[in-house]
Amino acid sequence: MSRYQIDASDLPFAREFLASPIGYHSPGLQRVLNRMRGADWAFKYVLVVEERHARWRLGRLPARRGSAVEIVEGVVYTDLLEAERDIFRRRWRDLTGQDLDIALNSAA
């Protein structure tokens, strides 16, 4: 069974997410998010709460359940929405090989 592949036709959904990372998402964006959150990763990016409602770290959740979360050094967030946007961009790059901001600017 082949999995849905994210491509340039999904750029409108990326714009939608960047405009509003939290809340209701259209069916198209939800399809993209489902692919990004799928189970076939060597690791998944996650947010690790360092200070409740104030400070988050970027972590990498390993594929093997029960293994320790790896903290990505030098990446700290103080804005939850920006943290969500950054993880979306990272997942986009990992799945498509493209920098999302460059792709969005090229498509504009």
Image (cartoon, rainbow, N blue to C red):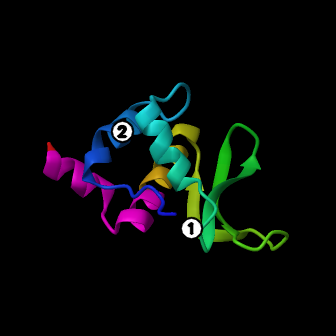
Residue 12's quadrant in the figure?
top left
Between disc 1 and disc 2, whose residue precedes?
2
43 or 32: nearer the viewer: 32
Q: Is residue 63 left or right of residue 72?
A: right
Q: Is residue 75 above or below residue 29?
A: below
Report if residue 73 lies within the magenta region: no
Residue 14's quadrant in the figure?
top left
The residue at 52%/54% (across/down) is 36
Q: Which residues are magenta?
A: 90-107
74 or 88: nearer the viewer: 88
Give the x, y percent position of residue 64: 76, 74
Q: Secondary structure at mark 1?
A: strand
Label annotation for residue 74: 1
98 or 6: nearer the viewer: 6
Q: Amino acid at mark 2?
A: Phe
Label 2: few (<14), some (14–19) or many (≥20) C-alpha neighbours in 10 Å = many
Give the x, y percent position of residue 67: 81, 74
Report if residue 94 lies within the magenta region: yes
Label annotation for residue 13: 2
Q: Nearer the viewer, mark 1 or mark 2?
A: 2
104 or 82: nearer the viewer: 104
Q: Is residue 96 above or below residue 23?
A: below
Residue 108's quadrant in the figure?
top left
Q: Amino acid at mark 1?
A: Gly
